[in-house]
Image: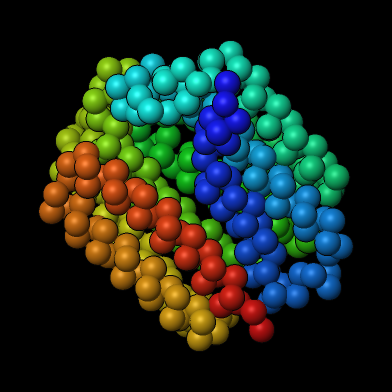
């Protein structure tokens, strides 16, 4: 079993983004002043909670998808034989418990939020994935957990974060639907009822685009409410253009190769969006 495979299976970019999202949310709520409010070790614990809980979810995803991945993603660590299913299961549990441990070092609210997020991610991977759109939304809820977690760290709630949570929720749901277009063959074999499987790739592309465009339509609200600075406007405009172009591309040509490319593009756009949220809310 190669160390490379252990790193690969946790999807490092996704896991780092979740940890980074906690920092972004802290910055949003405090206007960039979180370092003067929370001790550095607590901030590090927040990042590590997001990282390890997400890493655990990524491993569980590959564990429950091991049969589908033989068709859709044969080069992933489990189907190619670099990690056994049993090892992956144990690895996923250990990673999750590490994340929960770091959450417990912050406060009780953080522990509860982390437990809820971890539970929903496991529920999705074991059952929710087969439900199609509801499953997509379960994933998107988990993606928004870092924003909720950050407020638990501060023991306060800022209503403006609801807008950012909605932007992330809709953008990620669109990406999940596009992933379904890429995974039609394996999903059919396992009875996963994605929009692409039930209604076809063309319909799935249109629905994914709708979610993307809703996310884009929400991005001006923080500007209207005078909650963000010029950096947000510049960066989020780039993100918005990216999602609009992605919507046009996938609707015009909803085939597997395009969907694979666009889901990768979406993760980079979401990362840039997080940066826009962070630097754009510094006062």
Q: In this rendering, is residue 76 above or below 201?
A: above
Question: Which image quadrant is residue 27 in?
Answer: bottom right
Q: Residue at x 26, y 59 (%)?
A: 246
Q: In this rendering, is residue 41 above or below 189?
A: below
The quarter of the rendered structure image containing the N terminus is top right
Q: Observer-nearest residue: 8 or 194? A: 8
The quarter of the rendered structure image containing the C terminus is bottom right
32 horizontally vs 273: left or right: right
Question: Which image quadrant is residue 55 in?
Answer: top right
Q: Observer-nearest residue: 272 or 144? A: 272
Location of residue 125 in the rendering, given as x and y in whole percent from the top left corner: 49, 27
Q: Residue at x 27, y 17 (%)?
A: 189
Location of residue 68 in the rendering, given as x and y in whole percent from the top left corner: 35, 21
The number of callouts visible is 0
Q: Residue at x 70, y 75 (%)?
A: 32
235 horizontally vs 33: left or right: left
Location of residue 81 in the rendering, given as x and y in whole percent from the top left corner: 46, 17
Q: Residue at x 30, y 22 (%)?
A: 71
Q: Is residue 58 visible?
A: no
Question: Which image quadrant is residue 98 in?
Answer: top right
Which color scheme does this rendered protein use?
A: rainbow
Location of residue 70 in the rendering, given as x and y in whole percent from the top left corner: 35, 19
Q: Is residue 135 visible?
A: yes
């Amino acid at each position: 079993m190669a160390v490379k495979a252990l790193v690969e299976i946790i999807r490092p970019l996704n896991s780092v983004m979740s940890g980074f999202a906690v920092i972004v949310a802290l910055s949003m709520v405090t206007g960039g002043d979180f370092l003067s409010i929370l001790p550095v070790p607590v901030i590090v614990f927040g990042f590590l909670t997001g990282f390890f809980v997400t890493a655990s979810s990524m491993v569980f995803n590959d564990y429950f998808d091991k049969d589908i991945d033989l068709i859709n993603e044969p080069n992933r660590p489990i189907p190619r034989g670099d990690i056994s299913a049993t090892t992956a299961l144990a690895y996923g549990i250990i990673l999750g418990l590490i994340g929960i441990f770091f959450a417990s070092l912050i406060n009780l609210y953080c522990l509860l939020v982390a437990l809820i997020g971890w539970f929903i991610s496991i529920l999705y991977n074991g059952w929710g994935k087969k439900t199609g759109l509801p499953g997509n939304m379960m994933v998107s809820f988990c993606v928004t957990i870092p924003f909720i977690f950050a407020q638990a760290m501060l023991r306060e709630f800022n209503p403006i974060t609801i807008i950012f949570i909605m932007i992330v929720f809709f953008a990620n749901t669109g990406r999940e639907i596009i992933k379904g277009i890429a995974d039609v063959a394996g999903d059919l074999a396992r009875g996963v009822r994605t929009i692409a499987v039930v209604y076809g790739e063309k319909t799935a592309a249109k629905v994914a685009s709708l979610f993307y465009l809703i996310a884009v339509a929400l991005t001006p609200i923080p500007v209207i409410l005078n909650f963000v600075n010029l950096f947000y406007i510049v960066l989020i405009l780039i993100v918005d253009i990216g999602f609009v172009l992605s919507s046009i591309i996938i609707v015009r040509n909803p085939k597997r190769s395009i969907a694979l490319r666009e889901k990768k593009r979406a993760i980079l756009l979401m990362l840039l969006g997080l940066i826009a949220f962070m630097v754009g809310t510094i006062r």
